């Protein structure tokens, strides 16, 4: 536990990216009208969930008025609402909604993290900001010793997970992002399952539907329950 606590504290104290530091703190000062009475977190956001997990879920970055407000990734915004409803239906989350770090949400066999730990302007971290943040994700992967699979929410998460693993010496060929694409990454590596990100841009336009997202978590459940080694599949 001390190792996790140390990592989380290192993440929270990070100030490597001046643009992100300025933006997250500006948002926390000015606040959205609907949350005017709340105190924003306004710092980098660590991952959370089951430290004994078998599956890691990786998103892009905290929302300016979501995790940057609440201090917990995917908590308090539209993306999180869509995600946690799906996880609850699939049996991975104890409740279908997460609005605060103080609510009773518990994850089972899942740990949720992100490529970038600070809320970026326009939800778009710059390449050098991602480079600064990736070592945190790498350390989480090292600590998740029971990991058998990773779900990448969106192409940026997908591409940078592969980048991280290749930097660590794993010879992974070029892989194409597609919703529902499942890839074995090699011996002693987890499988990788790609999904569209549950952003409002995707869910409100119909690019990602409730049924499409449910199929991702059904596939994860099947992989865990049956324990088979996936072959390359694209739905």
Image: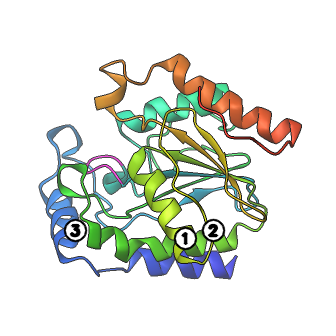
Q: Which residue is mark 2?
A: 141
Q: Position of residue 32 (x, y in %)?
A: 17, 44
User: Which residue corresponds to the image point at 24% horizontal and 54% vertical from the top-left?
Assistant: 124
Q: Which circle's residue, 1 or 3, is located before the other in the chain?
A: 3
Q: Which residues are magenta?
A: 62-66
Query: Of all residues shown, which one is farthest toward the front?
Result: 173
Mark on residue 20? 3
Instruction: Confirm or deny contact between disc 3 and disc 2 (CB under 8 A).
Output: no
Q: Position of residue 171 (x, y in %)?
A: 62, 69
Q: Nearer the viewer, residue 116 or 66?
A: 116
For the N terminus, the image quarter is bottom right
Q: Which circle's residue, 2 or 1, is located before the other in the chain?
A: 2
Mark on residue 166? 1
Q: Is residue 122 left or right of residue 48?
A: left
For the C terminus, the image quarter is top right
User: Which residue corresponds to the image point at 35% horizontal and 80% vertical from the top-left?
Assistant: 14
Q: Position of residue 97 (x, y in %)?
A: 51, 33
Q: Is residue 111 visible?
A: yes
How far apart are the two marked residues, 1 and 3, measured between alpha carbons?
26 Å
Q: Nearer the viewer, residue 97 or 64?
A: 64
* Pair 2/1: label in front: 1
* Pair 3/2: label in front: 2
Q: Is residue 65 magenta?
A: yes
Q: Which circle's residue, 3 or 2, is located before the other in the chain?
A: 3
């Amino acid at each position: 536990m001390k190792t996790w606590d140390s990592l989380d504290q290192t993440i929270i104290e990070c100030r490597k990216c001046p643009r992100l530091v300025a933006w997250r703190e500006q948002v926390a000062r000015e606040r959205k009208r609907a949350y005017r009475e709340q105190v924003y977190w306004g710092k980098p956001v660590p991952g959370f969930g089951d430290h004994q997990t078998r599956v890691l879920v990786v998103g892009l970055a905290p929302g300016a008025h979501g995790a940057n407000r609440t201090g917990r990734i995917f908590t308090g915004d539209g993306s999180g609402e869509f995600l946690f409803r799906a996880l609850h239906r699939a049996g991975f989350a104890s409740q279908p909604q997460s609005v605060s770090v103080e609510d009773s949400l518990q994850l089972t066999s899942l740990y949720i993290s992100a490529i970038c730990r600070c809320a970026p302007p326009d939800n778009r971290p710059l390449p050098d900001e991602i480079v600064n943040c990736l070592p945190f994700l790498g350390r989480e992967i090292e600590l998740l010793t029971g990991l058998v699979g990773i779900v990448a929410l969106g192409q940026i998460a997908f591409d940078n997970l592969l980048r991280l693993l290749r930097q660590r010496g794993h010879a992974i060929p070029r892989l194409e992002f597609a919703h529902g694409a499942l890839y074995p990454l090699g011996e002693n590596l987890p499988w990788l399952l790609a999904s569209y990100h549950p952003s409002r841009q995707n869910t409100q336009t119909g690019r990602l539907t409730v049924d499409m997202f449910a199929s991702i978590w059904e596939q994860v459940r099947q992989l865990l329950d049956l324990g088979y080694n996936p072959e390359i599949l694209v739905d």
